[in-house]
Image: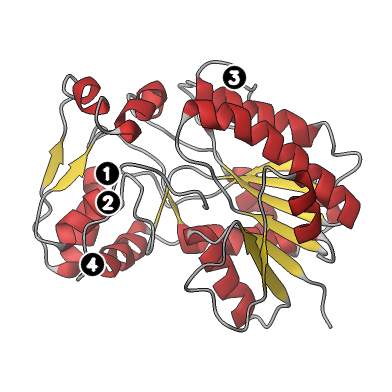
Amino acid sequence: MSEEILVLGYGAVGRAVVAQLLAEGRHLRVAQRSRPADLPPAVPFTPCDLLDAGSVAAAMAGAAQIVVAIGFPYDGKTWAAAWPRAMANLVAGAEAAGARVVFLDNLYMYGAQTAPLREDMALTSVGAKPAARAAATRVWQAATHRVRFAALRAPDFYGPGVTLSQLGDLAFGALARGKAAQLIVPADTPHDFAYVPDIARALVLLLDAPDSDFGQIWHMPSAPTQTLRQILTLGADAIGARPRVFVIPSFVQPLLGLFVPMLREMREMHFQWDRPYHVDARRFTARFGFVPAPFAVGAAATARSFVGSAPKPVMGAAVAA
């Protein structure tokens, strides 16, 4: 029997990773707090509480490799408490199992930058959520002499099944329902986005990479940078919708934040949207020959996935990537 791959987290990225591994005939298992309703019956499941070291160690036992595609509710206080603790549990569990870890990370820990984001940029301590991701980074980096760990850092992602995103239900979903896309960030600022099927491909490439590619950070390649308006227009064209966009005025957002926690939590992340946001992923592209899907493909597939869907709640955030 082939070595077992444990996929921790069954959100949009976890689903895409599982689908690819199943298509390749890999031996895999899924773990998270509760069994996903749409998990294929043939895929074994193990309950796992990331904040419980014993639960994490038990879930990782027997796995040769682990894909970590998890998250916590989008709340600064929650992140500050949960991310370093969860990362310590992941590192300890992987060490006990002798397993390699491929971790889907984000880019918050670089803080406000004006240049394209590079893997060698310093970690920030400004902002609750950026500081929390920086603290989690320090945990695994301090353990690279004991654990084989690779981090794939991706910008905001989009794709079929991704509802809580700037290109999610309030954007592509609204267009699919004949309404205007609603944005809380500028529509015409260039911003990198990663396509979920591409992220899954990149994670599997790291699973198949030699140990020499571990102990380091990799940036996720994206299609050539476009604005939200340009991406939404591509998706709207694919489903025959009018590409209408409504941006909630910035001066209104603090008031709305009193009632919509997500808006309140987004305020400290304004630096990702008040300037062009580019990610330098040349190292990954050169190493793996990776070619991301163009927005003409990704935006069309995403828009089509929302056709016939009902509006989704926006009060919280997904807890699996």
Label 2, secondary structure: give it.
Answer: helix
Distance of mark 1 from mark 3, alpha carbons?
Answer: 26 Å
Distance of mark 3 from mark 2, alpha carbons?
Answer: 30 Å
Q: Which residue is mark 2?
A: 231
- Tell me where residue 230 appears, x and y as whole percent: 23, 48
Sequence order check, earlier mark of 4 and 2: 2
4 and 3 marks in contact (CB < 8 Å): no
Q: What type is the residue that disc 1 sits on?
A: Leu
| Dot 3 crowding, Cα within 10 Å, few <14, some 14–19, many 20+ | some
**Direction top: furthest residue:** 126
Q: Which residue is mark 3?
A: 124
Name the foreground residue: 30 vs 303.
30
| Residue at left offset 27%, top offset 54% | 169
Q: Which residue is mark 1?
A: 228
Inspect this view and state whether residue 138 appears. yes
| Residue at left offset 15%, top offset 26% | 249
Label 4, secondary structure: give it.
Answer: loop
Name the foreground residue: 115 vs 131.
131
* Quadrant of the image containing the N terminus: bottom right
Label 1, secondary structure: give it.
Answer: helix
4 and 2 marks in contact (CB < 8 Å): no
Q: What type is the residue that disc 3 sits on?
A: Thr
3 w.r.t. 231: above or below: below
Q: Which residue is mark 4?
A: 309
Sequence order check, earlier mark of 1 and 4: 1
| Residue at left offset 11%, top offset 62% | 241
Q: What type is the residue that disc 2 sits on?
A: Ile
